[in-house]
């Protein structure tokens, strides 16, 4: 399998799908993730991820499939159960809001998040990071998964510096560094058989819907780019490539 290239500019999160696990009637796609700064791999910001079954499909909402291989922007999340700014310090899996980031430009799909998981899988379209998943019997440890999501958020904040606002309302990536966060993944092979690209979580708890009305009433944007920076949205992408 040829390795999918990264742009080697700015902050990027590369995800490469490796295999599909089956446990009873449930399936999950397992891959690896790595954060890059200007093309350089960041130590300590890597591991495995779990998504739902394939093939990737962005054409229908709520289809319990991972998203298509491609390039997507990373956005802040401001929902009831998951947020990028102001998540609860409580490590109990039931405590909300939990930490998370959102993928944008996912077609008719919505609420595709990078968020903590537990058990076999905690999503029907999102991405759950983990330390390791040796086989289909391996479970995601929630506390470890939560730490990994927070580490990615904190690294993104650190990379952007003052251009990453402390306030969800005023989140603004404008500044010395451009707003170009990418999550990338590609379709892989297992034993010669094609496996769908990874970027959809499956099974377990559904990703929550955002409280759009309340956000609109409060005038709060749910993503990092402001009206000025939205013109640069195409530069902020997540990409999965089919082989």
Image (cartoon, helix red, strand yellow):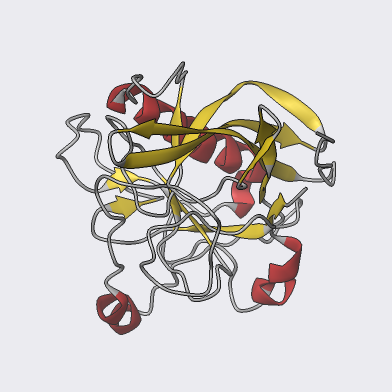
The residue lying at 55 percent from left, 58 percent from top is: 56
* Image location (x, y in percent) of residue 19: 56, 32
Using the image, determine if residue 93 lies above or below residue 68.
above
Using the image, determine if residue 75 lies above or below residue 30.
below
- Between 166 and 82, the one lying in front of the other is 82
- Between 209 and 215, the one lying in front of the other is 209
* Image location (x, y in percent) of residue 137: 33, 20
Q: On the rendered structure, is 181 left or right of 56?
A: right
- Between 163 and 35, the one lying in front of the other is 35
Using the image, determine if residue 188 lies above or below residue 137.
below
Q: On the rendered structure, is 93 left or right of 23?
A: left
Quadrant of residue 236 in the image? bottom right
Q: On the rendered structure, is 192 left or right of 205?
A: right
* Image location (x, y in percent) of residue 215: 32, 75
Quadrant of residue 122 in the image? top left
* Image location (x, y in percent) of residue 23: 32, 31
The image quadrant where one finds the N terminus is top right
Q: On the rendered structure, is 117 left or right of 88?
A: right
Badge count: 0
The residue lying at 39 percent from left, 24 percent from top is: 136
The residue lying at 63 percent from left, 53 percent from top is: 163
């Amino acid at each position: 399998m040829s390795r999918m290239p990264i742009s080697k500019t700015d902050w990027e999160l590369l995800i490469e799908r490796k295999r599909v696990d089956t446990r009873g009637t449930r399936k999950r796609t397992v891959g690896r993730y790595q954060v890059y700064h200007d093309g350089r791999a960041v130590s300590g910001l890597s591991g495995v991820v779990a998504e739902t079954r394939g093939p990737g499909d962005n054409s229908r909402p709520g289809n319990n499939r991972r998203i298509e291989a491609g390039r997507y922007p990373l956005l802040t999340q401001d929902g009831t159960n998951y947020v990028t700014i102001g998540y609860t310090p409580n490590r109990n899996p039931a405590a909300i809001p939990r930490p998370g980031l959102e993928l944008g430009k996912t077609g008719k799909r919505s609420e595709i998040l990078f968020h903590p998981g537990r058990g076999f899988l905690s999503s029907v379209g999102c991405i759950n990071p983990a330390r390791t998943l040796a086989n289909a019997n391996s479970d995601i440890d929630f506390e470890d998964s939560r730490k990994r999501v927070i580490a990615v958020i904190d690294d993104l904040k650190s990379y952007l510096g003052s251009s990453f606002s402390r306030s969800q309302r005023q989140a603004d990536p404008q500044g010395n560094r451009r707003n170009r966060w990418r999550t990338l993944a590609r379709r892989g092979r297992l034993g010669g058989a094609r496996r769908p690209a990874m970027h959809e979580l499956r099974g377990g708890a559904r990703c929550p819907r955002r409280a759009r009305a309340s956000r609109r009433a409060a005038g709060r944007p749910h993503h990092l780019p402001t009206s000025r920076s939205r013109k640069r949205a195409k530069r902020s992408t997540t990409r999965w490539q089919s082989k």
